[in-house]
Each structure stands twice: as structure tokens, then as C-alpha cells.
Image (cartoon, rainbow, N blue to C red):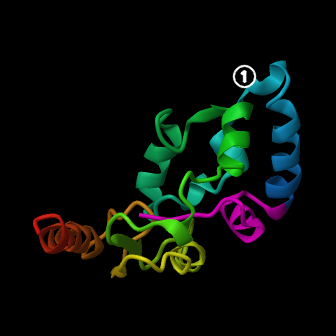
Amino acid sequence: MTFLDTESKQVKNAVSTSPFMAQVGGFFAGIGAHTPFKRMNIPMKMVSKMDALVNQPEALKVFLKDKTSAGNSVSVAFLHSYLNYKPEVQPEDFNICPVLLTQPENDHWTPLSLSTLFLNRITQVPVEIRLLKNAGHYPLEQPGLDDMVNIIDEFYKNNALK
């Protein structure tokens, strides 16, 4: 549902709780990842905009309490690896299959502009971007949720069954 180039300062700043956390926190995660602090867990809501995962306040409360979702903690080593991830195949070299982004229209965590930074670099295969109406990052809202199911089904039928 999102394509992020975490090598981009713009992307790091946008998905973090603040540009300060993205840059300074990212720097210290790099140092800490090579020390015994690499195993130290940090709540995701301290470093990333977990409050923007869903647009429904009641659902957000559930997500923030869920230790497998927005209430999760991750190690310093994980944060460092995430912020410095380098794909084995760069977008410019990707030539395997068509790409689909189902982008929620009201995604306040990873807006379309962040994904297009990555997707615009894919030129060897078709890239399709479809908006999910009225939906947040986790598309709980209608008609976005039904749109997502239908769009993915259509994409699969048009591409995988050939």
C-alpha cells in the first residue's frame, strides 16, 4: 500500500514524528546499532507517526494499544536497518512484473507524494496507481475498503492470469 525510499531525507522526515527525530534519531540509531544498545527497544509511536495509521479515533485507540501494530516497540538495530535499507534491485532496474499501488485518498502517514518519489523511478514495467476513496492509511473506510478489494482483484486477473 506504500512504496517508500527511506534513503530520501524527505521521506524520513515525513514518516517520523518530526524532522529532528528523523535526522538526529536516525543518526543515533546508526551509532547505537553497533553497540550493546542495538537490542534496546523503542516504542514506534516515539519515532514514527503511529497516530496517523487510521483516521477513525476509536480504531486508533485499538491500534495504539496493540503490541503487534502501532503499540509495538522495535530495536535500535531494526530502526537503523529500516532507515538505511537499500533494495537489492533498484527501482530503475526492476523489470519483473507490473506494479500496483492502492493509495488511500486520505492517507496522513504516507501520502501519495512519498510513494511517487519511488514509483516514478520504475520505468521498465507498467506502474498503476489507484486511489481508495475516503480511506486512511489502513483503509477501514468505505468505499475505499471495497475499492481496494476490487482493484487488487482486477489487477490480479489482468496480470497474473496471463
- Front residue of 117/20: it is 117
Asked whether residue 145 is drawn in magenta, I would say no
Q: Position of residue 108 (x, y in %)?
A: 55, 70
Asked whether residue 16 is drawn in magenta, I would say yes
Q: Is residue 150 left or right of 126 when viewed as pictured? A: left
Q: Is residue 33 left or right of 79 when viewed as pictured? A: right
Give the quarter of the image for residue 149.
Answer: bottom left
| Residue at screen point 41% across, 53% down | 59
- Front residue of 59/41: it is 41
Q: Position of residue 29 (x, y in %)?
A: 81, 39
| Residue at screen point 32% across, 71% down | 98
Q: Is residue 45 above or below residue 136?
A: above
Q: Which residue is labeled 1 in the image?
A: 39
Q: Residue furthest top?
A: 36
Q: Position of residue 4 (x, y in %)?
A: 57, 63
Q: What's the magenta region?
A: 1-19
Q: Is residue 13 above or below residue 73?
A: below
Q: Is residue 124 left or right of 130 when viewed as pictured? A: right
Quarter holding the C terminus is bottom left
Residue type at mark 1 is Arg
For mark 1, give the secondary structure.
helix
Quarter holding the N terminus is bottom left
Q: Position of residue 94 (x, y in %)?
A: 46, 66
